[in-house]
Image (tube, grey):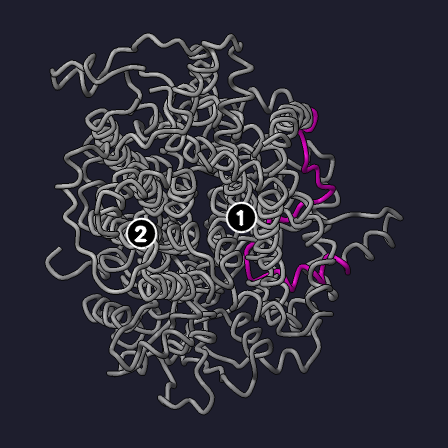
């Protein structure tokens, strides 16, 4: 199976018997056989759009509507408030620290899981999934139980005057915990789908392990990796529950953007609260714009690979 | 994919290294000159008070003082201090929350409530009803809350300090009305909770449910919260109704000596809390709808906003102080749990 | 390439395969690093939780876990999460398909919006959703005359959990769909398959692992969700109270042992469910061939 394209392993191989398996039932006007009829397409698009409208777009619109309720000056003023600026800085710093580490972990875990068979693999994948199912409240509590004053490492940290929880390290740790599965989970299905054929071919042609990884595997998974990093980043910036527990909520110092949103909202300052929230949404959308630009710029290479 | 190969992995590694270095180099982010860990509804009060105190401290000692604020649910804030949040002073909703700090750490002395005047409660509040404009359901007192068709909004007493005061205020009225007949009191409280369609986790959440979502006919709220909602969300839309009997809510304050000694802030922290009892502090409290201990220090028009009513204290034999009331009413398997359990359980 | 022939037919060996030799390098390095990282970040801190929960006597633990209120809350959390995950698989797959295969105005905007639930703090999502679906909100107002109440009911919990889980399904299906070889669909069509047959027998099997992964992740994420749900759930004991809220309530009483005990129960249930799904996936992968 040294197929240049990643084979779709689960699909039945078209063979002589396939003609019988798919009795011909052609009627009506001809349309390209690998897409749906125009009405079907329209219905599917309408269904997806309606669903996204109800579940995703409506909340987004309401966030922006509230944020701009006092017009643009109020919006800008809310975002340039010193406390808001400090929250924005902290949130970006936390993302810069936690996302690359989780990306590195994701690549390593996906390589081991997708390219090798080993005992306990399903168990390992399940442990990777675990942080998703852990309530953010518990995710925060976990670090308080380890690093807090009454935690396992509390006495040691206090003796050396190191502060983990209620300071930057705790916020970063909680964020990493909550976002650890993203990149791995994005890469695993794709790398499993792609199999090991490409890498084996490269190795048999004399490439080293690292060369194979940089030049064969990474290009094959780059979009999934990018998706994973984008999601990980978005979630890292938006995390509320876990960070709320370990942050200490000191205004202007350990408040991240989501916490700042809650504070402002509780002060009946709806405009400012939603302005900061909308900025989080914009940051998430901006990363997607970046992805789109990359797609356009390097679309040729992508098409060439897909054209097999 | 060319760009990907050259950009991402290198950038990833570099960012990870830089990240690790920064992580290692910043063991302490928060080293507040003075950190006041408080509960949710005091934001507006302490924003003004911190400015006033900074001016006072500058005048007294010539030093600039920076005051940092942390707000959250009263219980969660107390827990954070127990777990190592380096508060210099705590200004919380319930004495029992500061008791918890004193009990679980050695940072607050056991007799903290005797260190400042008036059981360390420089201002008080009470529980009132917020109703819609014109009071369409004609709600005057606690017995009106259980009339058919009346919906009551109150937060969950298991998660909200304010909701505990609500619960106890209702209990105080029922105890008085039914002459201490425990069965009748319980029946009233149980019926009251049957009129609650939503139990928010915090006081502000309940206010939002009542005002923005249009749910319920009456909101049980802190007096200062009710006034604030009135001001922020429209005096023409809501009215405050003061019941015949309510409870004297005493938010308490304390210096976290274990932390101030380490920070060298004991003196300024003590002065910070003492100044709350000064004419300036009392006037500010009254302006922010807290009932001051010394009404003569406050502006008369501020005092005029507080109607007189019978206020039962938590130390009344009916409740026997916070530790007892907490365990009896809100503890695991306590009265609230029993009352909200479905029949047969 | 490793063939199906080498697979033992003994059921145990299928569930627990031995490590098979491979020509690819880096197994020790990557697995070692991943296990180390996961151990430090996730497993060790979780061990602290188990340690704390062990502070409860077995009787107290059992009484807490089997309390009708706990069971009701677990039922709300896991039930609503399952329903939300199913909704997400259906509409998530549809969304991914439409985004990858069709070109229409506004596609890029929709593509971008899919990640919103991650970026928006959960509390903001809860506030926005409850304001939309409350009886006086724009969407809740439309549903109210039909007798459907969303906010402050079980349905509200499902809406919030659908919101936070959707990107998981879309973003796991999307890369696989983008990578899918159209040649196979062409081959099927050439051989006379109708479009529906091609979708069902060629495309769907190829997407199945990603769909299952998406389902797993959306479900897992929903079970633990707190921030968005408490704003729209109503939080009435026995009816719309979720399990994470019970944990917060225990914490409110400084009962760390009780809180961690509930966390452990949720963790164990989630772990068993996730493991079952992952084993199912590994099994179907081996049965259908491939790695």
* Quadrant in which the C terminus of chain B is drawn: bottom left
Residue B332 vs residue B238, the one in the foreground: B238
The stretch drawn in magenta includes residue B33: yes
Question: What residue does disc 1 label?
Answer: A238
Q: Chain of mark 2?
A: A
| Residue placed under numbered mark 2 in the picture | A33
Please give the range of residues in magenta: B24-52
The residue positioned 75% from the left and 45% from the top of the image is: B268
Q: Secondary structure at mark 2?
A: loop
B209 shown above or below C125: below
Side of B253 where B343 appears, left or right: left
Q: Quadrant of residue B174?
A: bottom left
Q: Is residue B339 visible?
A: yes
Q: Quadrant of the N terminus of chain B?
A: top right
**Is A242 drawn above or below residue A31 in the view shown?**
above
Dot placed on the residue nearer the N-terminal end, 2 or 1: 2
Quadrant in the rendering for residue B299 = bottom right
């Amino acid at each position: 199976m040294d197929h240049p394209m990643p084979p779709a392993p689960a699909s039945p191989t078209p063979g002589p018997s396939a003609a019988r398996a798919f009795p011909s039932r052609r009627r009506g006007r001809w349309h390209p056989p690998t897409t749906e009829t125009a009405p079907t397409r329209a219905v599917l698009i309408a269904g997806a759009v309606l669903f996204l409208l109800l579940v995703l777009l409506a909340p987004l619109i309401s966030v922006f509507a509230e944020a701009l309720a006092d017009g643009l000056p109020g919006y800008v003023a809310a975002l340039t408030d010193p406390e808001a600026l400090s929250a924005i800085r902290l949130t970006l710093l936390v993302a810069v620290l936690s996302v690359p580490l989780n990306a590195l972990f994701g690549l390593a875990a996906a390589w081991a899981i997708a390219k090798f068979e080993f005992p306990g693999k399903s168990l390992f994948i399940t442990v990777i999934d675990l942080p998703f199912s852990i309530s953010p409240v518990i995710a925060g509590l976990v670090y308080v139980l380890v690093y807090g004053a009454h935690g396992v490492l509390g006495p040691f940290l206090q003796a050396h005057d190191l502060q983990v929880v209620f300071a930057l390290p705790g916020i970063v740790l909680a964020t990493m915990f909550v976002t650890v599965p993203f990149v791995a989970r994005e890469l695993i299905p794709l790398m499993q789908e792609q199999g090991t054929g490409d890498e084996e071919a490269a190795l048999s042609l004399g490439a080293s392990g690292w060369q194979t990884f940089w030049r064969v595997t990474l290009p094959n998974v780059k979009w999934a990796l990018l998706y994973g990093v984008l999601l990980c980043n978005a979630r890292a910036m938006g995390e509320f529950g876990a960070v709320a527990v370990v942050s200490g909520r000191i205004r202007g110092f350990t408040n991240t953007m989501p916490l700042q949103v809650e504070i402002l909202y509780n002060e009946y300052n709806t405009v400012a609260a939603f302005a900061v929230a909308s900025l989080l949404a914009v940051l998430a959308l901006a990363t997607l714009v970046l992805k789109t630009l990359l797609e356009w710029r390097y679309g040729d290479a992508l098409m060439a690979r897909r054209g097999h | 994919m060319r760009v990907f190969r050259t950009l991402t992995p290198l950038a990833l590694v570099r960012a990870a290294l830089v990240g690790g270095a920064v992580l290692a180099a910043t063991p302490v982010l928060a080293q507040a000159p003075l950190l006041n860990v408080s509960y949710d509804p005091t934001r507006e009060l302490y924003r003004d008070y911190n400015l006033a105190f900074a001016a006072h401290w500058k005048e007294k000692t010539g030093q600039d003082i920076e005051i940092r604020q942390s707000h959250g649910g009263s219980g969660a804030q107390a827990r954070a201090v127990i777990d190592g949040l380096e508060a210099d002073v705590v200004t919380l909703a319930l004495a029992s929350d500061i008791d918890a700090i004193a009990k679980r750490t050695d940072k607050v002395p056991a007799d903290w409530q005797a260190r400042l005047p008036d059981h360390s409660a420089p201002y008080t509040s009470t529980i009132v009803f917020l109703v819609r404009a014109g009071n369409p359901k004609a709600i005057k007192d606690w017995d009106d809350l259980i009339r058919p068709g009346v919906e009551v909004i109150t937060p969950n007493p298991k998660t909200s300090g304010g909701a505990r005061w609500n619960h106890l205020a209702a209990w105080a009225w029922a105890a008085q009305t039914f002459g201490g007949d425990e069965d009748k009191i319980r029946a009233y409280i149980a019926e009251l909770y049957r009129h609650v369609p939503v139990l928010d986790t915090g006081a502000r959440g309940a206010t939002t449910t009542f005002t923005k979502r249009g749910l319920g006919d009456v909101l049980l709220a802190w007096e200062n919260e009710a006034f604030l909602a009135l001001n922020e969300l429209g005096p023409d839309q809501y009215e405050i109704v003061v019941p015949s009997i309510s409870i004297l809510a005493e938010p308490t304050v304390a210096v976290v000596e274990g932390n101030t000694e380490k920070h060298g802030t004991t003196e300024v922290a003590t002065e910070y809390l003492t100044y709350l009892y000064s004419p300036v502090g009392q006037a500010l409290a009254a302006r922010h709808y807290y009932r001051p201990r010394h009404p003569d220090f406050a502006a008369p028009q501020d005092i005029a906003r507080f109607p007189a009513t019978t206020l039962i204290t938590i130390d009344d034999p009916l409740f026997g102080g916070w530790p007892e009331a907490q365990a009896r009413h809100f503890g695991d398997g306590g009265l609230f749990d029993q009352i909200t359990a479905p029949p047969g359980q | 390439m490793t063939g199906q022939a080498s697979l033992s037919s003994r059921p145990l060996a299928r569930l627990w395969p031995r490590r098979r030799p491979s020509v690819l390098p880096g197994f020790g390095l990557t697995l070692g690093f991943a296990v180390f990282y996961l151990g430090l970040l996730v497993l060790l801190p979780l061990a602290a939780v188990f340690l704390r929960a062990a502070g409860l006597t077995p009787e107290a633990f059992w009484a807490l876990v089997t309390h009708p209120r706990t069971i009701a809350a677990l039922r709300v959390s896991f039930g609503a999460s399952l329903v939300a995950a199913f909704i997400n698989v259906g509409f998530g797959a549809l969304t991914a398909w439409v985004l990858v295969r069709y070109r229409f105005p506004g596609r890029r905007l929709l593509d971008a919006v899919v990640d919103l639930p991650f970026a928006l703090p959960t509390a903001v999502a809860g506030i926005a959703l409850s304001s939309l679906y409350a009886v006086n909100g724009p969407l809740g107002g439309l549903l109210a005359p039909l007798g459907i109440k969303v906010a402050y009911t079980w349905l509200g919990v499902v809406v919030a959990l659908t919101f936070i889980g959707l990107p998981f399904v879309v973003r796991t299906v999307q890369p696989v769909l983008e990578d899918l070889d159209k040649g196979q669909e062409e081959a099927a069509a050439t051989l006379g398959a109708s479009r529906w047959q091609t979708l069902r027998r060629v495309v769907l099997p190829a997407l199945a692992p990603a769909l299952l992964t998406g389902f797993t992740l959306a479900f897992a994420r929903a079970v633990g969700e707190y921030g968005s749900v408490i704003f729209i759930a109503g939080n009435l004991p026995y009816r719309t109270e979720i399990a994470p809220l019970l944990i917060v309530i225990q914490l409110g009483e400084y009962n760390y042992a009780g809180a961690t005990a509930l966390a452990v129960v949720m963790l164990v249930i989630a772990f068993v469910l996730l493991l079952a799904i992952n084993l199912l996936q590994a099994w179907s992968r081996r049965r259908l061939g491939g790695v």
